[in-house]
């Protein structure tokens, strides 16, 4: 069975060691690769993952073009590596429309947002303009949702902000990372699931399952590999029961397999999700295919 990891991170070889050290120190969590593309490829081979999507996080407004140019260069070797990068942007980046057009013209297919790194709410007008323009250009948007263990509050992608964007902007394709909101899964299930089904109905009815709203599984299940055992004891991943509840509520056709590598072990995620889905649903094999690769194929093929 094919597997596409829809949410990973890498860094240029010369920056990877320093970047990982900084991020590990701020989050007190341990990386599972060396942060390079070669390290990701080794992890993919062990896990049996055919393709990984790299999500660049633009923390400096002036670095968007250079980071996207690097992403396009990464994609030149996609047939060999199985690693494909989308684009990134910052709400303070000059000429946002032109940058998004460049992302489209470079063939990057989507754009990653991380409101917490920007210090800007997900439903800020600047973010809405990015999401709206991305939809016009046929780019999917994927955003960090919920807490980030490496950053201090406030949380910038909340349920209220997500609902506001859905109502006001009506994004064509939006992926909410970390199962819709890290550490907020009960409320996500209760509040967001009914809105999801209503929002996605028009795409489902039209046979356009590659459009609409999706969740990804990145950094949401299993155990966190802490560098310091007694740090962040209040932080945890969802239980198996909560994961199954969310799959039932949102539908397997709206969930994307994702790990957040290097911050989670790809092989562990492959095994855990397989065990949970096949052990909980009569049609588990079909559902697993949707989560592992079919949903990702649909999103990517629409771009």
Image (cartoon, rainbow, N blue to C red):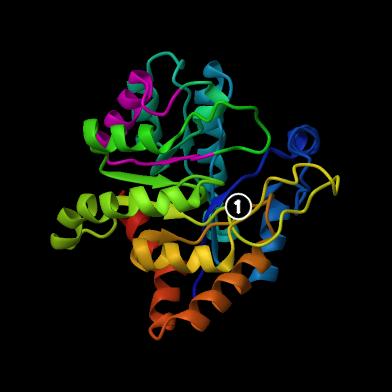
Q: Which residues are magenta?
A: 121-146
Q: Position of residue 81 (x, y in %)?
A: 60, 58
Q: Hey, which quadrant is residue 209 in on the image? A: bottom left
Q: Position of residue 151 (x, y in %)?
A: 65, 30
**Closer to the camera in the image, 271 or 87:** 271
Query: Is residue 79 a member of the stretch shown in magenta?
Result: no
Question: Residue at position x 38%, y 25% from top?
Answer: 127
Q: Say few, some or many: other residues with alpha carbon within 10 Å of mark 1 (under 14 / 14 to 19 / 20 or more).
A: many
- Residue 201 shows in the view: yes
Count up the numbered dots.
Answer: 1
Q: Is residue 278 above or below residue 2?
A: below
Q: Is residue 124 above or below residue 226?
A: above
- Residue 211 shows in the view: no
Please give the residue where the numbered disc 1 appears in the rendered image. Answer: 219
Left or right relative to 152: residue 295: left
Question: Residue at position x 33%, y 54% from top?
Answer: 193
Question: Residue at position x 38%, y 44% from top?
Answer: 109
**Closer to the camera in the image, 299 or 72:** 299
Left or right relative to 144: residue 41: right
Query: Is residue 129 a member of the stretch shown in magenta?
Result: yes
Left or right relative to 14: residue 285: left
Q: Position of residue 150 (x, y in %)?
A: 68, 34
Left or right relative to 106: residue 236: right
Q: Is residue 148 above or below residue 298?
A: above
Question: Residue at position x 29%, y 52% from top?
Answer: 196
The kind of secondary structure element at disc 1 is loop
**Closer to the camera in the image, 63 or 278:** 278
**Closer to the camera in the image, 297 or 186:** 186
Q: Position of residue 84 (x, y in %)?
A: 52, 50
> In this view, which residue lies farthest toward the bottom?
282
């Amino acid at each position: 069975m094919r597997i596409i990891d829809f949410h990973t991170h890498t860094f240029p070889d010369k920056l990877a060691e320093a970047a990982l050290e900084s991020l590990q120190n701020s989050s007190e969590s341990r990386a599972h690769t060396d942060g390079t593309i070669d390290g990701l490829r080794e992890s993919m081979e062990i896990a049996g993952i055919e393709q990984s999507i790299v999500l660049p996080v633009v923390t400096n407004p002036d670095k968007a073009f250079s980071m996207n140019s690097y992403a396009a260069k990464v994609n030149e070797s996609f047939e060999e590596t199985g690693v494909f990068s989308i684009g990134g942007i910052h709400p303070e980046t000059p000429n946002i429309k032109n940058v998004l057009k460049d992302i489209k013209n470079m063939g990057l297919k989507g754009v990653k947002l991380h409101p917490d790194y920007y210090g800007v709410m997900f439903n800020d007008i600047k973010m809405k303009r990015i999401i709206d323009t991305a939809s016009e250009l046929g780019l999917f948007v994927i955003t960090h949702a919920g807490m980030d263990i490496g950053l201090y509050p406030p949380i910038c992608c909340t349920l209220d902000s997500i609902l506001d964007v859905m109502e006001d902007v009506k994004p064509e394709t939006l992926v909410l990372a970390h199962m819709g909101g890290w550490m907020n899964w009960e409320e996500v299930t209760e509040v967001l699931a009914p809105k999801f089904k209503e929002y996605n109905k028009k795409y489902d009815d039209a046979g356009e399952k590659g459009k609409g709203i999706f969740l990804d599984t990145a950094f949401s299940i299993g155990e966190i590999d802490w560098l310091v055992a007694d740090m962040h004891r209040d932080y945890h991943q969802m239980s198996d029961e909560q994961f199954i509840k969310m799959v039932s509520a949102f539908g397997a056709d709206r969930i994307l397999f994702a790990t957040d590598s290097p911050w989670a072990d790809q092989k562990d995620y492959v095994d855990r999700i397989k065990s949970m889905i096949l052990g909980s649903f009569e049609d588990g094999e079909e559902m697993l295919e949707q989560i592992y690769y079919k949903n990702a194929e649909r999103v990517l093929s629409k771009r």
